[in-house]
Image (cartoon, rainbow, N blue to C red):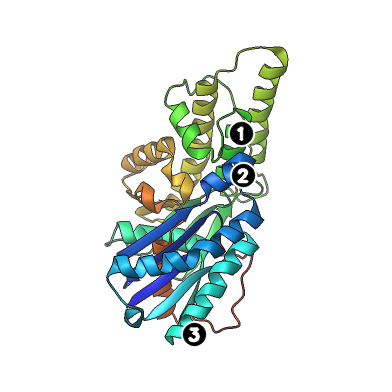
Amino acid sequence: MRILAFESSCDETAAAVVEDGRKVLADEIFSQVKLHEIYGGVVPEIAARSHLEVISLLADRALKTAGVTRRDIDAVACTYAPGLIGAVLVGVNFAKSAALALGVPLIPVHHIRGHIAANYLAFPDLEPPFVCLAISGGNTMLVDVRGYTDMSVLGQTRDDAAGECFDKSARVMGLGYPGGKPIDDLSRQGDDRAYDLPRPAVNDGNPFDMSFSGLKTAVVNIAHHAQQTGQPLDKPGLAASLCRVVSEMLVSRTMDAAKLLGYKNVAVAGGVAANSRIRADFEAACEKAGRALFVPPLRLCGDNGAMIGAQAYYEFLAGHTADSSLNAYATMTL
């Protein structure tokens, strides 16, 4: 089954052709980073307009790269939640039009489910059940993946996402936007014990919930204090300390969840999964605990259409299709 899939939830426009949920025939992506970096973050209106400008071109390019024609497409899929509402609407409406024109089923896909499914593309032998940590600029959640479409959230951030913490910290350190890679690169040059950063906790009975707002504020305060007093700021040390604390918060909860559920497989997904410290700490923790670790290659960590096509295959098998009344949503539970 060949699925033409679209992703437009934030600042990447993507179109892909995926076969049977595991084989990527094409994965075309247009990044809007250059459009937003001068503003220090994503501007929703600019993002939506950019999606409109390139999505049709990317669809044609994906078909050409895959070596297929429109008649070879068996279904069309798209991210329909969550995300910037204007951006998501572009992908949803284009996908609805494509499905109608081609006379094929339309498959709506939750963005986070797509990130989790990126692991199926990277590791063809991976099957549920497993624990997956989904970490990105807008979401941070720990998921019990009981089946391809049977999932529940074990815990999540109560405020900022881990990726947002990195982005805001990078901004105050003058590293630009997006902040994940600059923070990661700089951290490799620093002492991860240079700063004693807090580990915000959520004390209401759920040990898997997280909070990153206080950690972000601590980094901002350290940077502002150095600027106001004229004291030197050890940017590599601050970046390394931040990566260490974020990683410890994420890895410890994920490993505890895997132990509680008795799962041997642990997966990580989303843009923040590209962070070298987090990847290394997960490798060490899983090796120590005797669990298998699954982390997609960097090209599948960020937003892409292939992950939507992968999850769409299993949504289709479960009977989860939509008609032309499908709408886009800024927020939605997993």
Q: Is residue 308 visible?
A: no
Are dots 3 and 2 in contact, CB under 8 Å?
Answer: no
> Which quadrant of the figure contains the C terminus?
bottom right
* Classed neighbour count for the residue bearing mark 1: other residues with Cα under 10 Å, few (<14), some (14–19), many (≥20): some
Looking at the image, tell me whether mark 1 or mark 2 is earlier in sequence order. 2
172 or 156, nearer to the observer = 172
Q: Nearer the viewer, mark 1 or mark 3?
A: 3
Residue visible at 64% across and 55% down in the picture: 44
- Disc 1 marks a residue whose amino acid type is Arg
Looking at the image, tell me whether mark 3 or mark 2 is earlier in sequence order. 2
Between the residue at mark 3 and the residue at mark 2, the CA separation in whole angstroms equals 35 Å
Would you say 104 lies left or right of 246 here?
A: left
Q: Which residue is mark 3?
A: 100
Between the residue at mark 1 and the residue at mark 3, the CA separation in whole angstroms equals 44 Å
For the view shown, which residue lies furthest in the bottom direction?
103
Residue 163: % across, % down? 55, 44
Q: Which residue is mark 2?
A: 41
What secondary structure is marked by label 2?
A: loop
Residue 74 higher or lower than 291, as above or below = below
Disc sitting over residue 171 in the figure: 1
- Disc 3 marks a residue whose amino acid type is Leu
Are dots 1 and 2 in contact, CB under 8 Å?
Answer: yes
> Which quadrant of the figure contains the N terminus?
bottom left
